[in-house]
Each structure stands twice: as structure tokens, then as C-alpha cells.
Image (cartoon, helix red, strand yellow):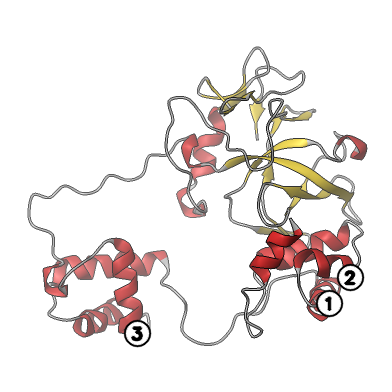
Amino acid sequence: MQKQSANICSTMGRSEELSEFQRGTVVGCYLCKKSVREISAMLNLPRSTVSAVILKWKRGGITTALPRSGRPHKLKEEDRQVLERVALEKCLPSIKALTAEFQSASGASVSSTTVRRELHEMGFRGRVSSYGKPKGVPKVAKKQVDVSRLDLRIGRVVTVQQLPDTDGLFVEQIDVGEAFPRTVVSELSQHVPVEQMQNRMVVLLCNERPVETRGIVNQAMLMCASSQDKLEILDPPNGAIPGDRVTFQGFPGEPDKELNPKQKVWEQVQPDLRTDGQCVATYKGAAFEVAGKGVCKAQTMSDCEIK
């Protein structure tokens, strides 16, 4: 794992900022009693960088970097919608003319190069003047909202520590088959003893947008069977390893790279996540399944919601 981490971190230029993911990982490792030397070696980051991230977190409880000045890397979703409408309706002669019309319609300040790249990502090809849709061409259907859009994976808890100054929060480093572990904050310490968490296999939702919890960037969510007064962590099948995908018969498709909070995918899918009468985790009756290895289950909680 350290070798893979080194390969990733070595591709960063000296002037590049650490991502929120990397900063959150540094703080998570620190809270799990790793030294600056150990974190530096594990993530292949300079000790000075590791120390600076930890110091910033101690002083302000944040890990995110301040935004840089300059043009945004890409357009906001609402601006992309305006750009698509302009491209389809105006039939302008050049990318320069389209950029000017888009800037007037949206108020965004972007270059022709950015506009061309965004249009390319939307699927526009060829001459700008040919972008208008012919009459009678049906609109592309919106992506269906079901469990296939969730990136559910098997993980293994590498380290776990109760978050300082809290009654119920754990901070865990969890291996999900990536270059280095993900930092996860969960409200489990009142339900699961810390000794039962170490090296435990778990099910994680890995494509929610990272959010800060008590100054730590939370990079995934543990899946648990839940009632008003009880929680049980879902157990993967025997033989499952970190990184294995959880799939659902009858719901094919690839998960979103990152769930868009505005689309409320999780909020629409979660009410149909339940354990059945045999404690098997399901979505609309389809089991949480790891191909060739079995299904995910709660220990004792049947007919309960999963969240």
C-alpha cells in the first residue's frame, strides 16, 4: 500500500496544493496516533507538509486549503445548462461568438478554450454552427435513480480511535483497495466497542461528496442496520476483500463518480434499503451481493432500515 501511495504522491508538482482527500487522510492518521514521521513515510509527503496540515487543523479545526485566485477550472452545473441551451438554440458561427453569447447569458467569465472543453464533455462535436438539434430528435432520458448509482464497496478497518471531546464519534482509517485508506467519522462508539472495530470488515458508501465533521474530512459512510435504539454494522460475506464491489441483481449499471447533492440520489434510494427476515441487507428485495462470495448481513437485526 505504501508503494502505491508513493506512486500517486510522486506525481504531484511541488507547487500543487494537497487535495481535501489527502489533508483529511493526514489528520485522520494523526488522530489514530500516527507520528509525523510515520504519516510522511506512509503517504510519501514531506514532513514539513504533514506538520503544516496538522498545525492548521489544531489551530482552526479545518483541513481545506484557501481557494486560489484565477479562473475556475470548470463551470458550475447551472452554467453548463446555460451553455448547452445557447449551443443548441443560437447556431452561432464560431466558438468565439458562442463564448461571447454564453458570457452575456450567464455572467460567467471563461475563455473560449474552457467553453470548447465543456462542450466536448457534453458530447458536442464538429462545427459550432451545426450544434443545433434537428427537429424530432428525442431528448436523452435522465439517468434512473436506483441503487446502482451508489458506489458500495467492502473495506477493512485499519485503525480506529474515539474522536477527542466527543461521546459517540469514532474516526477510522479504512482500506477500500485504494492507494491509501479513507478517513471515516461514524457515530458508533455507543453501540460498538472499539476492540470490535479493529480489523473488522465493513460495507462503505464511497461516492458521497466528502464533508467536514469536527474539522476532519469524512470520505465515506459505514453501512449499518438501524433502529431507534440500536445499530449493527453490516458484515460482508466470508472471503470478501477490500475494494470488492457490492452489486444488486436486477439493477445493473456503474455508480456515479460522485453523488450530486442537488439530485438527492441517496435520499431517494435509502428508504428502500432494509434487512429482510433473515437479516440479509437488501434494496427492494435484491440482496447486497459480492459476486461469487455471498451476501452482506446484519448480525441479529431483521426488518430494519439501513443507513
The residue at the point 45 percent across, 49 percent down is 263
Where is residue 128 drawn, in percent x and y? 16, 74
- Quarter residue 13 falls in: bottom right
Looking at this view, is 119 or 86 the one in front?
119
**Mark 2 or mark 3: which is in front?**
2
Q: Position of residue 206 (x, y in %)?
A: 61, 47
Q: Mark 2 and mark 1: span between their CA atoms?
A: 7 Å
Which label's residue is closer to the chain start, 2 or 3?
A: 2
Please report the residue visible at 58 percent of the width from the left and 27 percent of the height from the top: 289
Mark 1, secondary structure of its residue: helix
Q: Secondary structure at mark 3?
A: loop
Q: Quadrant of the N terminus?
A: bottom right
Q: Position of residue 266 (x, y in %)?
A: 54, 42
In the rendered image, residue 80, in percent from the top left (x then y), is placed at: 34, 67
For the residues marked 2 and 3, what is the alpha-carbon distance in whole angstroms? 43 Å
Q: Residues within 10 Å of mark 1 (few under 14, many from 20)?
A: some
Residue at point 67%, 49% (across, down): 220
* Amino acid at dot 2: Arg
Identify the residue under disc 3: 111
Q: For the residues labelled 2 and 1, say whether their Cβ atoms are less than 8 Å apart.
A: yes
- What is the crowding at mark 2: few (fewer than 14 residues within 10 Å), some, or many (at least 20)? few
Q: Which mark is residue 37?
A: 2
Task: Specify the quadrant of the image occupied by residue 205.
Answer: top right
Residue occupying the point 13% across, 59% down: 133
Per the image, the residue denoted by label 1 is 47
Task: State which tag comes first along the sequence, 3 or 1.
Answer: 1
Quadrant where the C terminus sits is top right
Residue at mark 3 to residue at mark 1: CA–CA distance: 38 Å
The answer to whether any part of residue 216 appears in the image is no
